Each structure stands twice: as C-alpha cells, then as structure tokens.
Amino acid sequence: MRYVPRQKNFLIYFPLWIPFLSCLAVAQVFDSGSDGSDGALVFEGTGTVLFDPSTFDPPLDPDGDNIYHFTSITIPSGLTVRMLAPQLNWSPVYWLASGRVNVSGTINLVGEPGLDINVSTENHRPSIPGPGGFPGGIGQNNINPPTAGLGPGGGSPAPASTSAGGSAAHATVAGGGLQENTYGNVYLRPLLGGSGGGGGGNFQKSVGHGGGAGGGCLVIASSESVSVGGAILSRGGRNVDPTLNAGIGSGGAVWILAPVIAGAGSLHTTGSNTSFGIGRVRMEAFQNLFNGSIIGVFRRVTLVPNTPFLPTSGFPQVRVTTINGNPVSSSPTGSFSVPDATIDSASSVVVGIEAAYVPVGSIVDLIVYSESVSIQTTVSTPLVGSFDQSTATANLLFPPGFSRGWAHATWE
C-alpha cells in the first residue's frame, strides 16, 4: 500500500480494513432464556433426592410447563437427583440457567424396571417412565393377558408361546424389532422420551413380568457453561427378571446448549443394551470440550445464538377429571390403599376426561385394570374444545373392589 503523507484537508480512507474490524466486534453470545426467577438450584449432601417442584418453598414451576428459570445449577459429587414422570407432569424438563451449570453428581431419568406382579397387588400397573417418557406394559396373570408398552416405539406384549414381552425402540430398533418402530430425529423436535417395553406372558412361569418404562427427556441450557463431570442417565427400564433380555424400555433424550460444554462424565441414553433401543443425545456449543462417555444417537454441533429449543406449545397430556361426578385429583396416586375416587353404583358411570395439546376430534382410550375381572378398554367420545384444552367422556362399569385405570390418546 502506498504511503500518503497526512496534510490539511486530506481524507485518508482504507476501505479494506472495515470488514476485518467489523468481524472482530462480533461476540459469540447465547441467551438461555432464563430470567433467574427461580434463583440458584443448589443440591447438597449425598445419596438420592427426588426432584419434585411442589416440595420447594416457594414451589417451583407454578404454571406447570416444566420450564425452570435458574441463575445457576449445582449437583455435587455423590448425590443423585432422581426425576420421574408423575412429579413432572409426564413431560420433558427444561432447566434454564443464566450462569454456570455444574453436574458433578448424577441426574437420573431412567425408566422404572418392569414390575413383578407376584409381589403385591400394587404392582398391577404400568411401570413409571422418566419425565417425557412412556410407561411399560403390564405382565400377564391368571385373569388378564399382558399389555403392550406405550409410546411410538412401544414393545409388543408377549405372545402365547413365550414369557418374553417385546423390548422398545427409539432412535434405533429394539432387539428383534422392526425398523418401522424407530421414531424421532437428530434435531430433537419434537422432544420425545423412550417408549415402554411390552408385558411378559406366563408361559412356563406362574405370572408374567411387566415391561420396563422409557427413559425421560432433559434439556439443560446455560448462558455461560455446562460441565458434566458426573453423569446424566436416561436409560430404559429393565425387565425385573435379569435372565430375560426382553420387555425393556428404550432410552430417552438429553439436549445440552451452552457457549462452553466441558467435563469427562457420562451421557447415556441406552436401551436394552448399547446396540438396541437407544435414545438421543444432542450437544450445541461454541466450544465443546466434553470428552466423556456418550451412548446414544449423538450430534455435536456449533451453537447458533438464537437457537429455538423451547416448546412452542405444551406437551400433550390427557387425564381423568371426574368419575360419576366426583372430582379426581390432578395428581392421582393410583394407590390400592387410598383410592382417588369412590364409586357406589352397580351401573355404568360417566368418566370425565380432559386433554391439553391433543388435536380436537382425537379418541381417548380408557383402560381399567381390576382385581377380579379382565382388563376393560373403552373409548371416549371425540375430544371437543380447542387444541390447548379439550374434553371428552366415556361410560364404564366398574366391578366391585379396587380398580386402577389410565388414559392415553394416539393420533396421526
């Protein structure tokens, strides 16, 4: 470049410098979206603690959307934070932090193992998934056949000639499963957890074992950094019988977004083993320094400052609100010891159903498992209302004694 002496009334212009200087002025900034209103989430001690928003003072997540606004998150070594669907609206969990996230301990979103219905009547139910996952099927007894696992990749119930229920699929097929059973995508939109394994039969056994539940979903987003020196586990629940590699839930999904991701811990979304029924892991960062163990269909990508990752609508939910005109708690226990509703009628009664973020016109299946009669399945009237909130009814004759029921909907 030719040197031009500086003189009065001279204008010196270097056009080639401007783009270079402009690039230097751009900073890599990511906003997790946390407003810090939930303060710092700091766990202390060792052992296992259940993450239940209602036990905090004041309670977390009053609107029930499972989106939390923390300033920072700390899980110390030696402590396991357990997450189960009933305490978390059966939907994916979003932990947002304006500051650092340090996971030196363990976050456990693993689905409940299949239940041994020989143990007690309390085990005559689907196994419980991690938040955003799907329940496992019920094992066969002398009255009822085995049931399928729930979810897009749910395992089939055991056929008459075997005691083994089918394992579930997610990002990969289940053991012996079909390619059509897989679901989801690498972008984790929509965010889906693992499916439940199918219930076992009683072929050559006194009863069948229940299927394991699916692993849950967790999103961790930080405006600063996320370090995983411990573990985030979202495995599918196993069969209660360790000799049977069947009826196992599939792995869930873990999604981490931060300018810096570091640590040498574990991110596992396994299913029946490291080859079948595994879930998904996605990491987005400007600097990804994580060098730990990852099991899952995995994507490591460069973070985009305005990445859309929060749900645009709520997670689909369906629940029973009334039985024979009597209200049912929004958090039913399903316990045979303390019933959620009492019915005094020898005739069929009306069951009120409410859904959220389920297409209007969908049909809800109402399944009731009783002590003395076979499983009853009835269908509701089509849902009416809006996508955000709709209702339906079903007529059902409850037998004497205790019954446990659940509702689910499927749609295209």
Image: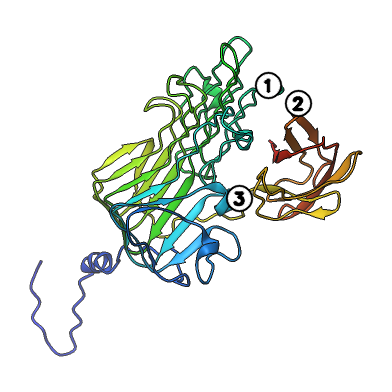
Q: Amino acid at mark 3?
A: Phe
Residue 2: x and y in percent read: 9, 69
**Pointer 2 or 3: first along the chain:** 3
Please tell me how crowded label 2 is: few (under 14), some (14-19), or many (20+) other residues with Cα within 10 Å: some
Q: Quadrant of residue 382?
A: top right
- Contact, CB < 8 Å: mark 2 with mark 3? no
Left or right of 10 on screen, residue 273: right
Q: Nearer the viewer, mark 3 or mark 1?
A: 1
Q: Nearer the viewer, mark 2 or mark 3?
A: 2
Residue 154 visible in the shown view: yes
Q: Give the vertical position of 18 relative to 141 (above or below).
A: below
Q: Give the vertical position of 396 relative to 283 (above or below).
A: above
**What residue is shown with label 3?**
315
**What residue is shown with label 2?**
374
**Kind of element beneath mark 3:** loop
- Tell which residue pokes out farthest to the right in this image: 347
Left or right of 164 on screen, residue 366: right
- Which corner quadrant holds the C terminus? top right
Please tell me how crowded label 1 is: few (under 14), some (14-19), or many (20+) other residues with Cα within 10 Å: many
**What residue is shown with label 1?**
145
Residue 87: x and y in percent read: 56, 53
**Kind of element beneath mark 2:** loop
**Kind of element beneath mark 1:** loop
Q: CA distance from mark 2 to mark 1?
A: 8 Å
Residue found at x 48% / y 24%: 174
Residue found at x 51% / y 28%: 169
